[in-house]
Structure formats: structure tokens, C-alpha cells
Amino acid sequence: MSIVVLRMLLSLAATIAAAVVVPLSNGVTQTGLLYNVTNAPQLGEIDPRFTTDYEQGQERLSATSCLMNAVNAMMELALENFTEPIRTRDYMDPNHPEVVIMPIALARGQMVEARYLLWGTWEGIRWMISHQSFLDLVIGGYWDGILVCRIWIGGTRRHLSVAGSNGTLGLTARSEKTSIHNATVESTQGLSMMGVRNPLNDHHVTVFVTEAGETLGITKVFIAIFAALEYMAHFPSNAEVVRFQISPDDEDTTIGILEHTQAPTVRPPFLEYQWVILSVGQIPAYMLQQRRFTEVIIEIAVDGVPLGQGFLSK
């Protein structure tokens, strides 16, 4: 274990009261990496009143592009007001443009609550993963049995053919600026840095990632990220984060976030959900670029000020 990793683990340990022993791949165990949260397996789960049905097509899609576009869409939707109706638009990660996630209007000019679009995307990509079938898919979303949204996950080429003569996608400024495509990665002796600027308030978020242990399953990483994004979407984006840990109940991968030991306590910036949403949304892109899906420790800084830290681990 490198000195950098050890110091970060010890820093995490010192800040968490309820310690759990977690083995790392080199045989060393470290107390305090994880901590107990009431109903942790249920965090990131969808309200059971929301149900879905599926209609699968025949167009083959890139599994990677489906997963990355789902992260991009859920990251954007998590920044919206959870129960507020929003204008529907298309979601596409410019770094994986083969796939688009497109809400289908039930009526002209209809607005849809952000949570329904987020849940529909989450359920649709989870259906693809569980069935190991990455074909174009229409997801119907129902609230208490009433249809509230339809979402299509499909190929960009087919979408462009029906988008209009100019073949443009309905992407917004937020889509282009908060996209995973805007993350930059620099590796320095095992410590990597990713930066993304939030277009809503012009703060710059930097994520430091250190690979710290065992190899993780690719879909397990994505499911943990999706669950974390769903959980954080419930809170106002500018609310201060209360430390949390999420272990999807059908997986063995856990993600946790807490305040940094050097975070300010009196004056801003503070660790807000928007910073964590933007940071967590960058992790899969980093792992794809590195061609390694491993346990990681992350640190989150805003405008150079350390605010948060966390982990993704077995």
C-alpha cells in the first residue's frame, strides 16, 4: 500500500465513529473505512409506487455507451428539483454518442417530474444489465398505476433520422457542460485528478482518485454509482451533505461519502450534494480511461478547497 493511500485511509478512519473492518487486496485491514447508516441497503432504492414496463426492439447497442449515457442522464437529473416537473430533453454523453436517452412526450408540451425520468432511466438500464440484453428499449413509467412517462434508450443514428432535417439533438447547455466528456484526467504516481466546472454557478470541482484495493466488477461499479445518484437526487442540490453509505441490496459493492477532515466549518464553500453528484458521475469515465475497475478512495475539492472524501469498495 502506498503512503498516499495509507494516509487517506487513516484520515477517513479518524473521522468516522462507527468502524467496520474492511480487507484490502494486499491483505492489510483498515478499520474505519466504512460506517453504519440506518437501512443502508435501502438507500438508493426506488419508491415502490413507481413501476415500469418494457418494450425491447432489435437494434443492438454498445453496452458501454448505454451505461455511460445512463450515468450522464442520471447525473443531470439528480441536479434538478426532484419532484418538480421539467421540460423533457434528450440526454447524450458526447464521449459516447452512439446512444441517446430520449423521453417520449405523452402530450405536446408536457412536463415530467424529474424523479420519474431519473427512476425510469435507472430501471431501464438495470433491466438491460439484469437481462444482459443491450438492445433499444422503451421504458414505461407508472405512478400508482398511472402512466407518467416513457423513455427510449436507443441508437443515435435512428434518432437523427427522425429528429428533423438538420439532424440535431435536443441537448441543453447544461447537458454539454456537465457531461462526463468535460472531465479531464491526469495521473501522477497513482493519484489521478478529474476536474469539471459546474455551469450553474461557475465553481470548479476537482476529484482526486486513488486506486486502493481489489478489482471490482464493471456492472457492480455502475450499479453503485446509479444508486448513489438516485439517493442524492432527493435532496436540494445546494443542501449540505450528510455522510452516507450505500450498498445496493443485490450487490457486494459499497459507496460512501463524508466531509473532509480539512473542510471549512464556518465559511463556504461547504460540501453540497451538487458537488458530490458531479464528482461521483466522473468515476466510471475515469475507470474506463484507465481500463481498470478497482476499489478507490476519492477526495472532492471545490475551487481548491477540500470538502469531501469517500470510497467505492467491496
Image: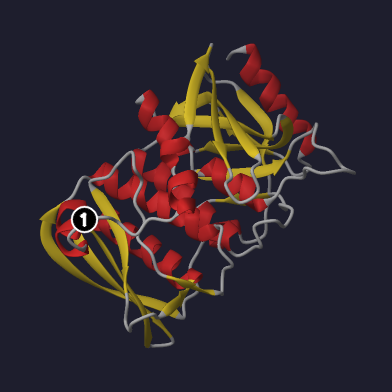
User: Which of these two is toward me, 164 or 189?
Assistant: 164
Q: Residue at x 66, y 19 (%)?
A: 6
In this picture, residue 53 sits left or right of residue 240: left
Count neighbours of disc 1 (C-alpha within 10 A) and say few if under 14, some if 14 to 19, many if 20 or more: few
- Picture quadrant of residue 107: bottom left
Q: Is residue 145 above or below residue 227?
A: below
Label 1: element kind: loop
- Where does residue 120 sit, x and y in percent of width and height? 38, 68
User: Which of these two is toward me, 32 or 291?
Assistant: 291
- Where does residue 170 sit, x and y in percent of width and height? 34, 59
Q: Could you tell me which quadrant the N terminus lies in?
A: top right
In this picture, residue 267 sits left or right of residue 189: right
Q: Residue at x 71, y 29 (%)?
A: 304
Q: Is residue 74 above or below residue 256?
A: below
Residue type pointed to by label 1: Gly
- Picture quadrant of residue 237: bottom right
- Picture quadrant of residue 196: top right
In this picture, residue 38 sits left or right of residue 312: right
| Residue 91 visible, this orientation | yes
Q: Residue at x 71, y 32 (%)?
A: 12
Residue indicated by mark 1: 167
| Residue 43 visible, this orientation | no
- Where does residue 184 sit, x and y in percent of width and height? 48, 28
In this picture, residue 1 sits left or right of residue 48: right
